[in-house]
Amino acid sequence: MRKGDDVFAGSIPENYDRHMVPLIFAPFAADLARRAVALSPQAVLETAAGTGVVTRALAPELPAGTRYVASDLNQPILDYAASRQPTGNPVEWRQADALALPFEDASFDLVCCQFGAMFFPDRPAAYREARRVLKPGGHFLFSVWDRIEENVFANDVTEELADIFPDDPPRFLARTPHGYHDKALIRRDLEAAGFSSIAIETRAEESHAASVRIVALAYCQGTLLRTEIEARKPGELQAVTDYVALELARKHGDSSVAAKIQAHVILAAA
């Protein structure tokens, strides 16, 4: 991961939550919440909670009295997540580095993380921290994106930006969100951290949007592609977004578009 690939600031959190969450994150959040509830945890730690899509899906499904701590390294995005959480679902919000968790050993039955591990600069270290705070017999449940070629809109946007910037194409999506998809490597990293009984399931969903303009806005202005675009063409973010939308329309049409998204869902025992 390149330095800066984890800095979600400014208007990115709001655009991310408004566009990216319903486009690609919500289906997997519902699935992760279902898997988490099936484990019957009494204390849950969510790392890299982002704008809270899993938190909003999982917290209402947990029995009363379940402790739920949602954490993220990035305080602005965590503040945004807290502002979006419905009342009546008690959640403790904590700014925390997944590589140095501020919790006692054996504090949680479940550590969960949706699409955050790709951003960890030292994944085995983060996994060791997750294992440290888990009680004996606890579980680490997380997901990562499969390779970019299995995620149609992300791949299309990356190719379209390469047409605009042939000498220095923005590669954030391929480099980081879709850069940690090797299942053998994921298994080795978890084993190095002391986890056992590792199950990795590849799961496909479908990404839906009312128009390709929403897809273009989501990727170009709701992810760190925005930073890469603005660095290459200052003041032309909207023009680049418009070009991407036009090219997406050529491939997918302009209304009620849908495309494949695919991820790995991992469950490991402490």
Image (cartoon, grey):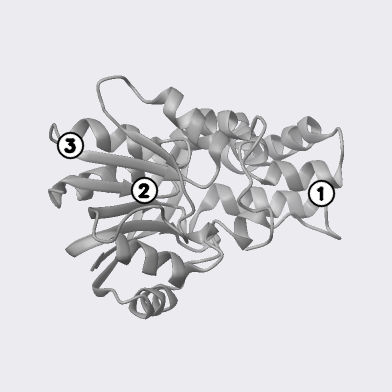
Crowd rating for badge 2 (residues with CA inside 10 Å; few <14, some 14–19, many 20+): some
Q: Does the image show residue 156?
A: yes
Residue density around tag 3, few if under 14, some if 14–19, many if 20 or more, within 10 Å: many
Q: CA distance from mark 1 to mark 3?
A: 47 Å
Q: What residue do we see at 77% from left, 57% from top?
A: 169
Q: Amino acid at mark 3?
A: Leu
Look at the picture and state if 254 lies above or below 44: above
Horizontal side of residue 258 vs 216, given as left or right: left
Q: So how many labels did they put on this image? A: 3
Q: Which residue is mark 3?
A: 62
- Residue sitting at 25 percent across and 47 percent down? 44
Judge whether 227 appears above or below 256 on screen: below
What mark, if any, has residue 205 been given in the picture? 2
x and y percent of residue 245 in the render?
Answer: 67, 35
Secondary structure, mark 3, is loop
Identify which amino acid the numbered label 1 is placed on: Ile
Disc 1: which residue:
164
From where the camera sits, is residue 254 visible? Answer: no
